[in-house]
Image: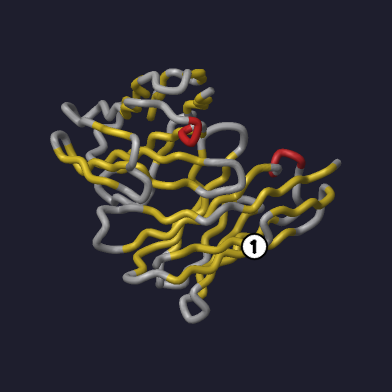
Amino acid sequence: NAGVTQTPKFRILKIGQSMTLQCTQDMNHNYMYWYRQDPGMGLKLIYYSVGAGITDKGEVPNGYNVSRSTTEDFPLRLELAAPSQTSVYFCASSGVGKNIQYFGAGTRLSVL
Amino acid sequence: EDKVVQSPLSLVVHEGDTVTLNCSYEVTNFRSLLWYKQEKKAPTFLFMLTSSGIEKKSGRLSSILDKKELSSILNITATQTGDSAIYLCAVEVGGSQGNLIFGKGTKLSVKP
């Protein structure tokens, strides 16, 4: 049972670099989400998708982009990394019931 | 603005103690409330509560929603060191594609 898989687990970027955080799920879930979690804060929604080809902004989308070409994959793109994007990023997915989200192990990103 | 507030933000207890974690919410169009446990990595699902008011139990953990008070409690009896984690409360609001609004979490430390 792989569930939700995120890669990489850790990454250090320099200011201005770009990278893609990968997320894939094998539960055939329609709904997928990207969150960031800063110390002492709850999870903030960056982007979400209700199915292949459909994405929408969450609470904190600035500086990020997403795409959803398949049901399984939902990559998150950082174009010009900034220190404010230092955080732990979680990908999640949910199925027909929508409300129970299952999370990946997270990607810890530092922008220096 | 929708918000979810958890209290206390941190708590230190000794093994065998009973703890109660609180979650209150102010949201439009409430659908459900979820509790997650976050150890070092991904949040893992514990309970989902709806306005039915039915208590949920799993071993030493239990939770209930008070729809009049717009709040929920998570009880842990006979705590163990393995219960040490951040407990996250999240509220699903209707009409937003299953999006969850998270509280900041309660960090529970159980000492031997």
**Is A52 placed above or below A14 here?**
below
**Is B5 placed above or below A81 here?**
below
In this picture the colour scheme is secondary structure
Q: Residues within 10 Å of mark 1 (few under 14, many from 20)?
A: some
Q: Nearer the viewer, residue B104 or B94?
A: B104
Residue drawn at point x = 46 percent, y = 33 percent: A85
Q: How many marks?
A: 1
Q: Nearer the viewer, residue B35 or A8?
A: A8
Left or right of B30, for residue B90: right
Q: Position of residue B67 (x, y in %)?
A: 46, 76
What subunit carries mark 1? B
Residue A3 in view of the camera: no
Residue drawn at point x = 43 percent, y = 47 percent: A44
Q: Position of residue A92 (x, y in %)?
A: 37, 37
| Mark 1, secondary structure of its residue | strand
Find the residue positioned furthest to the left. Answer: A53
Residue receiving disc 1 = B7
**Is A105 placed above or below B66 here?**
above
| Residue B37 found in image quarter | top right
Q: Callout 1, which amino acid?
A: Ser
